[in-house]
Image (cartoon, helix red, strand yellow):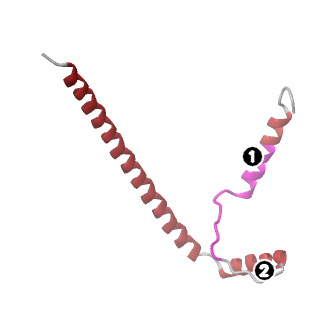
Amino acid sequence: MMTHMSTWLIALTAFSLVFAALGLLAALLFTLRALAVRSLRRKSMAADDALDPELLAVLAAGAYTALGAPVRIHRVHVHGESGGQAWERAGRMDIMVSHRVGKK
C-alpha cells in the first residue's frame, strides 16, 4: 500500500526529473545559439577584411564631411539586401497604409 507521503515523493521526483531535463535542453539550446553567433561573427570579420580600401576611404570621407572631425572606421556591415528591394517594400507599405479602414 502506498502512503500519502510516498505519493508526494513520487510526484516531487517526477517533477524534478522533468524540470532537470528541461534545464538541460535549455542549456543545450543556449550553447548551440552562442556557437552559431560566434561562427557568424567570424564569417563577418572575414568578410570585413575583404572590403575594398577605396570603399573604406569613401566612407571615412563621408563621415568626416558629415561630422566635421576626423573619424576612424572600426567595422563595416554590408547588408545583403539590394536597394531596390527596400524601395519595393516601402512602396508596398505605403499602399497598405493608404488602404486602411478606420482611423489613420
Q: Is residue 69 left or right of residue 54?
A: right
What is the number of the mark on residue 61? 2
What is the number of the mark on residue 27? none
Say which amino acid is labelled 2: Ala
Residue 41 against residue 9 in the figure, above or below? below
| CA neighbours of label 2 inside 10 A, class few (<14), some (14 to 19), many (20+) | some
Residue 64 % position (x, y): 80, 79
Marks 2, 1: nearer the viewer: 2
Q: CA distance from mark 2 to mark 1?
A: 30 Å
Q: Is residue 1 left or right of residue 70?
A: left
- Residue at (19% x, 24% y) in the render: 6
Residue range highlighted in magenta:
74-92
Q: Residue furthest top?
A: 1
Q: Is residue 102 magenta?
A: no
- Residue at (65% x, 61% y) in the render: 79
Q: Is residue 11 left or right of residue 75?
A: left
Q: Nearer the viewer, residue 49 or 34?
A: 34
Residue 65 against residue 28 in the figure, above or below? below
Circle 2: element type: helix
Residue 101 % position (x, y): 84, 26
Q: Which one is earlier in the sequence, the residue at label 2 or at label 1?
A: 2
Q: Is residue 50 left or right of residue 86?
A: left
Q: Is residue 78 magenta?
A: yes
- Residue at (42% x, 51% y) in the render: 30
Give the total number of marks visible in the rendering: 2
Q: Are marks 2 and 1 in contact (CB under 8 Å)?
A: no
- Residue at (73% x, 81% y) in the render: 71
The residue that disc 1 covers is 89
Q: Nearer the viewer, residue 103 or 36?
A: 103
Question: What quarter of the picture does the N terminus occupy?
Answer: top left
Say which amino acid is labelled 1: Arg
